[in-house]
Every structure is written in C-alpha cells, then in structure tokens.
Image (cartoon, rainbow, N blue to C red):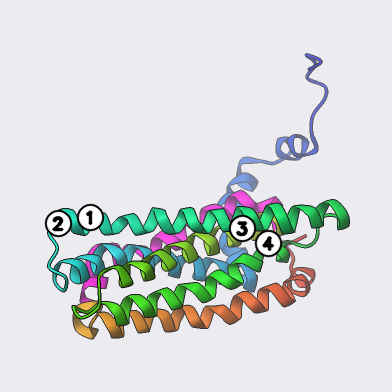
Amino acid sequence: MTGSGRYKSQSEIGQAELSFNQLTYNAVVIPWKINLLDPAILFSSIYTGLVYAIFYSFFEIFPLVYIDIYGMNLGEMGLAFLTVPIGVALAMSLYYCFLFWVINPRIRIEGLAGPEQRLIPAIFASVVIPIGLFIFGFASRLSIHWAVPSIGAVLISGGMITVIQCMLLYVAMAYPTYSASLFAGNDFARSSLALPVSCGRAHYLFRNLGIEKGCCLLAGLTIGCIGGVVFLYLYGAKLRARSKFAI
C-alpha cells in the first residue's frame, strides 16, 4: 500500500533469516519428526490414510457388487459412483450448518476456543463410517435391492470427507507454524496407504473374504478409530501442552 519495502510481516522477517539447509529441514524433516513424536499428528495421519484407502477400495468393490451380484452393465455400475458426490454434498451441508449455527455464534460470544472444538463433527462422522460399511457389506446380496448398499456408500463417503476436513482443520489450528509441511506429510501418508489398494490389493481382500467379511474387517478398523477421535477431543489440549510443536 505504501510502495515501501521497509515494512514486513513477522513471518517474512523470520523466513529471510533462514538458510537453505534450515528451509529444507523444516520442509522435509520436521513433518516426519512431528509425526513420530506427536501422537495427535500420528493418529490424524493414520486415520485419514485409512479412510482414504477405504475410498479407493470402492474402485474394486463396486464391480464385485453391482456387476457380479446385481448383474448391472459397466455403464450402470458407473452410476453407482454418484453415491460419492451425494454423500459429500450432504455431509458438507451439515458441516456448514454446524459452523454457522454452533461454532460461529460461540466464537462471537466466547472467543476462539481450542482447536478440539473442530473435531466435534468428526466424532459423529467416525461413527457413521462403520455404520455405512456394515450396511454396504450385509446388504450386498441379490435378495436386497441395490439401493440399500448404495445408502451405505453414501454414509461412508459423507463420513470420510467430514473426518478428513476436521482432521486437517485441527492440524492447521493446533500447529500453524508447520501446517503446510504437515499437510504434505498427511497427504503422503494418505497416498501411501491408498496405493496398495489402488493397485488391486482390495480386489483380493473381497474375493478371499467375501463382501460381507471384507466390509466387517474395514468397519472394525474404523471402529477402533472412534476412541482416538474422542480421546483427541477430550485430552487434545493436554497433549498440545506437552508438545514441542503445537501452540
């Protein structure tokens, strides 16, 4: 605004004093160091990676359900993937309502609370994911209409996008200094866990165990993560107080 280069933000001043080695260390080493030493970040990386891998398993399980069981052709089976944007749209609508009618009024009255408040939708979403997996697994049979497992897929998609959204927002608010690097690390963890699934490993899982048992296995893993989200919501502030990286 002034046309003068004398005025700089604190972050610009701090960045200018960093050497190339320091920048590289902060960008490459720090995210992995935080993941190993900070249980909150480690859990967020594992959980988001798990739900991301479950999402990738859709590309393997949908043909087994909608083509092999319900006898749909390839085009009809492709329409089943519309459950994903439907689930995302419903979840984000509810998430917006939560921010607009719960979080924002509370901020105006009480001020900005701890980042754990942003995990409240994730608690409900973490319960929705295994419910959707159980519905999809047990309803995927010819005696039950194809719309029923599709409802399960909608619940899974909505729960996954809510969990990822809340986890990333929590990381950004609790670790603002390293948020960009932690986002990159989280993305790497998600992609690493999803890579074996995208290479066809989920196909063998559902072929060997069956749709029902395969979905139960994935649901069991996500049920175990419910306690992690609740624990992070209740005791996240204490964990941050002991962390060397959080604020």
SS at circle 2: helix
Please tell me whether mark 3 or mark 1 is closer to you in this view: 1
Give the residue drawn at x 20%, y 59%.
77
Of the residues under marks 3 and 2, which one precedes in the sequence? 3
Contact? badges 4 and 3 (CB < 8 Å): no
Q: Nearer the viewer, residue 203 or 14?
A: 203
Q: Which mark is residue 118?
A: 4
- In the rendered image, the residue lying farthest to the top is 3
Residue 149 percent location from the top left of the image: 31, 72
Residue 26 percent location from the top left of the image: 62, 51
In the picture of the structure, the residue carrying the numbered disc 2 is 74
Tell me the kind of residue under disc 4: Arg
Contact? badges 2 and 1 (CB < 8 Å): yes
Of the residues under marks 1 and 4, which one precedes in the sequence? 1
Q: Which mark is residue 22?
A: none
Tell me the kind of residue under disc 2: Leu
Quarter of the figure that contains the C terminus: bottom right
Q: Nearer the viewer, residue 212 or 192?
A: 212
